[in-house]
Image (spheres, rainbow, N blue to C red):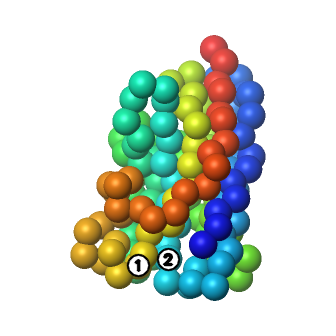
Amino acid sequence: VQLQACGGGLVQAGGSLRLSCVGSGRSFSFYGMNWFRQVPGKEREFVAAFSWSGDSTYYPDSVKGRFTISRDNAKNTLYLQMNSLKPEDTAVYYCAAIRISTARIMGVLDYRRYDYWGQGTLVTVSS
């Protein structure tokens, strides 16, 4: 499984960005994809996730109401629409893939359960 993320950049506070992540690979259909972010010196944290079934979405309070996760299954592409960005959203954003069978048992919020990671895309929000 390979993941390729893009869409990061520099934006002013209050602005918007849309991240994309394309997944590929022979066994890709057995995996679900979600978004995480990491600030240097801090632990990686989830920012948006689909449940293992894809029927529900999860967001931490810090981004709820501002970020939206979506996907286009036909294109194997995951998106993260980020609105009303704040300086504290500055981080490297990663898409990650977890086996659906793992997600069903262990959930989707713990980054340590994920098997594959994209290269990360830097989002910088200036004040």
In this view, 124 is above or below 18: above
Above/below status of 81 relative to 105: above
Question: In the rendered image, which residue does mark 2 sit on?
Answer: 31
- In the image, 126 versus 110, the foreground residue is 110
Are the two marked residues, 1 and 2, in contact with CB atoms closer than 8 angstroms?
Answer: yes
Q: Which residue is mark 1?
A: 100
Q: Provide the secondary structure element on which disc 1 rests.
A: helix
Q: Is residue 95 left or right of residue 74?
A: left
Question: Label 1 neighbourhood size at 10 Å, few (<14), some (14-19), many (20+)?
Answer: many
Judge by depth and name the residue closer to the eye, 16 or 89.
89
- The quadrant of the image that shows the N terminus is bottom right
Tag shown at residue 124:
none
Give the image location of residue 32, x and y in percent: 49, 73
Side (left or right) of 47 relative to 91: left
One can see residue 59 in this view:
yes
Q: What residue is drawn where x is 47% and y is 54%?
A: 48
Question: Which is more toward the observer, 75 or 3?
Answer: 3
How far apart marks 1 and 2 lie (CA) works out to 5 Å
Q: What residue is at 37 percent from the left and 36 percent from the top?
A: 43
**Residue 28 percent location from the top left of the image:** 58, 80
| Residue 83 location, quadrant | top right
- Three-letter amino acid code at disc 1? Ile
Q: Is residue 56 visible?
A: no
Q: Quadrant of residue 107?
A: bottom left
Q: Residue at x 42, y 25 (%)?
A: 41
Q: Earlier in the sequence, mark 1 or mark 2?
A: 2
- Indicate the amino acid at tag 2: Tyr
Q: Quadrant of the C terminus?
A: top right
Report the residue that reaches farthest toward the left. 105
